[in-house]
Amino acid sequence: MSSTNLNKAVSPEAGPDATPQAHDSASSKSSGWAVFTFFMIGFVGSLLAGWILFPELLYSQKNQPIDFNHAVHLDAVTDGCDSCHYFREDGSFSGMPDLAACEDCHQEAMTDNPEEVKFVEEYVTPGIEVPWLNHSKQPDCVFFSHAAHVQGADMSCASCHGDIGTSEHTRVYEENRITGYSRDIWGQSISRLGKPGPGDPRPMKMNDCAECHEDETGHKGACFQCHK
């Protein structure tokens, strides 16, 4: 066999045995890209599904016992939020208004609004306190002084609670099925990326309070200030 024929016999470019190797290499690359593409589609799809479905699984939804119109009441009172959510003589915060505060104006229904009629018939007349669902309720180990923030630091209620004073209907109460607390404590964003929009309530986790204190005062504060 001549050297020319020998070179042709062993040359990877000429022999018929070289073709499957080239095809295998191309097939391997194509298969790798297919796996990567499939993985990315699955990853992004799972992420989107989690963002949409996870809150539905984690939080149950409840309506307030009465669809309360804050806007109407805020227009009718003279002291703003303090008219119903006031400070007692000892400086403690009253929190949710009790039935006595409502009875001053609602011994009888003043309109034919179904919610007001329901309120008078089911709560005022029999003398039953309204079981309001508190969006801002913190664990028992947390102490929050409204006086220090509203009176001392001159903060508005909207700073934390958003534009609830202009709302005409109560928001749906979303309760964490595991902890039993409102979604407002964690915040509406599951990922907690970004900040709440204008008028939205602020999340009330420990880190949120610490960051606000650091922004306003330059330090986060001591543990005992909130944990008594």
Image (cartoon, helix red, strand yellow):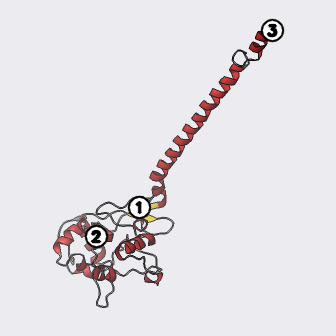
Disc nearer the start of the sequence (1/3): 3
Q: Which three-letter amino acid code belongs to the residue tagged 2?
A: Ala
Which image quarter: residue 146? Answer: bottom left
Q: Which residue is mark 2?
A: 158
| In this view, the mark in front (2 or 1) | 2
Disc nearer the start of the sequence (2/3): 3
Marks 2/3: CA–CA distance: 95 Å
Q: Residue at x 19, y 68 (%)?
A: 72
| In this view, the mark in front (1 or 3) | 3
Mark 2 Cα shell of 10 Å, populated few (<14), some (14-19), many (≥20): some
Disc nearer the start of the sequence (2/1): 1
In this view, the residue farthest toward the top is 2
x then y, percent, for residue 120: 25, 73
115 or 67, nearer to the observer: 67
x then y, percent, for residue 103: 24, 80
In this view, the residue farthest toward the right is 1
Helix, strand or loop at disc 1?
A: strand
Helix, strand or loop at disc 3?
A: loop
Horizontal side of 129 relative to 210 (left or right) equals left
Mark 1 Cα shell of 10 Å, populated few (<14), some (14-19), many (≥20): few
Q: Which residue is mark 1?
A: 61
Helix, strand or loop at disc 2?
A: helix
Up the image or down, 32 lies above or below 56; here it is: above
| In this view, the mark in front (2 or 3) | 3
Q: Residue at x 30, y 75 (%)?
A: 123
Q: If the image is split into quadrants, where does the N terminus sit?
A: top right
Which image quarter: residue 60? Answer: bottom left
x then y, percent, for residue 31: 61, 32
Q: Which mark is residue 2?
A: 3
Q: Which three-letter amino acid code belongs to the residue tagged 1?
A: Gln
In this view, the residue farthest toward the bottom is 90
Marks 1/3: CA–CA distance: 87 Å
